């Protein structure tokens, strides 16, 4: 009996290391399988994860409003390039604004009669103190302001471009001339003071050469320059410096027409200058 107990005890002692080894092998195998499955699952998730989309800030907030006087422009500019490069058609529902990005859609409401029309910004203007938008003839007709030529309106942004170009800047228009030579003289004078000045041409029956100075990243900074310049100059306007609108380079021949003659011709045909 004693021999049997000794044999049994010895047998247990002999089997214990083997059981431990088998248990360790099994545990290691189970861990390896679990790790493999987890890694495979992670790889699968990485392949199917949605890529982050670029975030675009709106060029101007939808719902932005502005109130002021509107005018309309027609014949002298009809069929000629607008500031965004497309041909201005006075029978389309388009408009000019000094700072709104191109392709901004505005709802324009005539505050005297409540009539509204939606227009797309394609041009720059008006460059008359106290006015905030120049409408096409078609848009002006829809809100019944053709006869008066001007009306008090409310603008509301109803759609805007997806984002602002990285080279988006603001400047100050300090003058517009029928003579390129006069515009260039003023441009050179202010370039020395503000490091940046250029000429842009507004096509019409008679071209007008616009002198722009300053190159600021915010409208507020350009407004501060305008405040400085308005001390000595009456017609000073903050404008958006559109990156696709190059500085004007004079051609081989340039016609210099007296500014008074230009003003008289435009005033007869364009209610903006009445």
Image (spheres, rainbow, N blue to C red):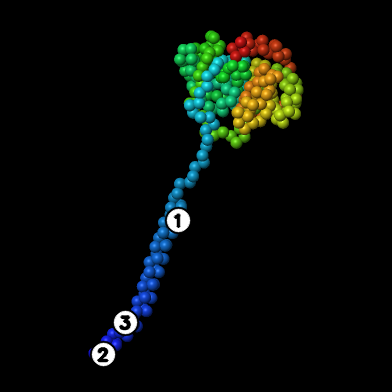
* Residue located beneath label 3 in the image: 12
Within-10-Å neighbours for mark 1: few <14, some 14–19, many 20+? few
Position in image of residue 1 (x %, y %): 24, 90
Q: Which residue is drawn at 36% across and 73% down?
A: 23
Closer to the chain start, of discs 2 and 3, is 2
* Left or right of residue 14, residue 88 in this image: right
* Residue located beneath label 2 in the image: 2
**CA separation in Å, label 1 and label 3:** 46 Å
In the depicted view, which residue is nearer to us: 218 or 115?
A: 218
Q: Residue at x 53, y 27 (%)?
A: 104
Position in image of residue 214 (x %, y %): 67, 29
Position in image of residue 56 (x %, y %): 52, 37
234 shown above or below 17: above
The secondary element bearing badge 1 is classed as: helix
Within-10-Å neighbours for mark 3: few <14, some 14–19, many 20+? few
9 shown above or below 76: below
Closer to the chain start, of discs 1 and 3, is 3
* Residue located beneath label 1 in the image: 43
Question: Please, which residue is most extreme toward the left here?
Answer: 1
The secondary element bearing badge 2 is classed as: helix
236 shown above or below 35: above
Closer to the chain start, of discs 2 and 1, is 2
């Amino acid at each position: 009996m004693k021999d049997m107990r000794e044999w049994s005890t010895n047998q247990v002692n002999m089997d214990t290391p083997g059981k431990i080894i088998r248990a360790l092998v099994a545990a290691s195998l189970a861990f390896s399988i679990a790790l493999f499955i987890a890694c495979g699952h992670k790889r699968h998730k990485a392949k199917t994860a949605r890529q982050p989309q670029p975030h675009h800030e709106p060029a101007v907030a939808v719902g932005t409003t502005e109130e002021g006087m509107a005018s309309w422009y027609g014949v002298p500019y009809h069929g000629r390039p607008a500031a965004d490069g497309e041909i201005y058609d006075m029978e389309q529902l388009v408009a000019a604004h000094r700072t709104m990005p191109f392709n901004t859609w505005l709802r324009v409401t005539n505050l005297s009669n409540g009539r509204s029309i939606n227009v797309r910004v394609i041009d720059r203007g008006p460059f008359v103190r106290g006015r905030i938008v120049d409408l096409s003839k078609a848009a002006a007709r829809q809100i019944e302001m053709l006869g008066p030529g001007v009306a008090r309106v409310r603008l509301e942004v109803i759609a805007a471009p997806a984002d602002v170009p990285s080279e988006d800047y603001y400047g100050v228009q300090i003058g517009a001339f029928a003579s390129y030579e006069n515009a260039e003289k003023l441009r050179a004078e202010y370039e020395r003071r503000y490091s940046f000045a250029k000429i842009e041409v507004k096509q019409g029956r008679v071209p007008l050469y616009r002198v722009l100075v300053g190159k600021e990243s915010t409208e507020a900074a350009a407004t501060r320059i305008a405040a400085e310049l308005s001390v000595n100059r009456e017609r000073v306007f903050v404008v958006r410096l559109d990156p696709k609108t190059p500085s004007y380079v004079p051609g081989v021949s340039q016609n210099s027409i007296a500014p008074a003659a230009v003003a008289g011709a435009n005033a007869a045909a364009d209610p903006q200058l009445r």
